[in-house]
Image (cartoon, rainbow, N blue to C red):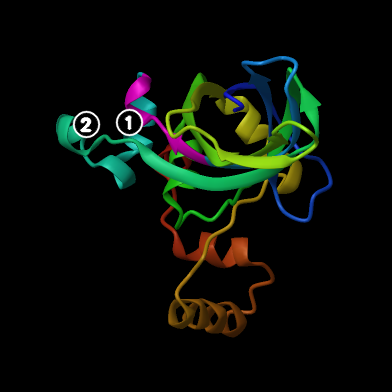
Amino acid sequence: MPDLDFRVERAAPVPFGATPLMAFHIGVTNADPEEAIYSVALRCQIQIEATRRRYSPEEKERLLDLFGEPERWGQTLRNMLWTNAGATVTPFSGATTVEVQVPCTFDFNVAATKYFHALGNGEIPLCFLFSGAVYYDGGGGAQQVAPIAWNKESRFRLPAETWRGMMDLYYPNTAWLCLRRDVFERLYQFKVSQGIATWEAALERILPVPEEAVKR
């Protein structure tokens, strides 16, 4: 019966997608290099291991919305589920590589987006938990199926710059903000009534002037 191991090797943004996509290249190795694997229906649960890195004072300030005051992080700082993804591994013997594409969002109502955006330099600690089914040659040309062992996982440190580069690729100099419908309608009416041309100008009219600008 197949005994597969998995290793996340690298990650890169997928260019020209309809939505932001991060491609993770995962090495797959079978304990028996001669065994014929017909295919693998691979599933990945990806967790953010937030406790596995240090944070600068600036990052801690940007993470207040997620974890609260740093003095309370002993109780509030926890790993988070990022997403679930899947891929089909094509026939191989011994070892192969599969690309798992993970849809990403710049919606700041999503905890993972808040976390990624808060980080400056450094890396994002991720843990991939693998599951699924392996279709293999059971002998005499008969196809058999076996589950992937429950304890198969791989850790990967995604450079924060890679995530920012992906968002810059899809949303250059832009961020998305999701508003409750009634709040949007009020903002829209303000924009129209004041004859303001852009949403940025409307928000700048409402927001207070930064102290640095006043001092100049």
Q: Nearer the viewer, residue 208 or 87?
A: 87
Q: Does the magenta stretch include residue 26?
A: no
Q: Give the range drawn in magenta.
A: 45-53
* Residue appearing at x 36%, y 21% in the figure: 52
| Residue 149 drawn at (x, y percent) | 48, 32
Q: Label 2's element?
A: helix
Place of residue 40 in the rendered image (x, y in percent of width and height, measured from the top left): 68, 39
Residue 41 visible to the viewer: no
Q: Is residue 52 magenta?
A: yes
Q: Looking at the image, which residue is at 41% across and 56% down?
A: 208
Sequence-wise, the earlier of marks 1 and 2 is 1
The outermost residue toward the front is: 140
Q: Mark 2 points at which residue?
A: 70
Asked which quadrant contains residue 211, the reply is top left
Residue 145 in picture, x, y percent from top left: 63, 42
Question: Front-most of 149 and 101?
Answer: 149
Name the residue located 47 percent from the left edge and 44 percent from the top edge.
82
Which quarter of the image is occupied by the N terminus?
top right
Query: Which three-letter amino acid code belongs to the residue tagged 1?
Result: Lys
Does residue 68 appear in the picture of this structure? yes
Mark 1 burial class by Cα count in 10 Å: few <14, some 14-19, many 20+: some
> What mark, if any, has residue 60 been given in the picture?
1
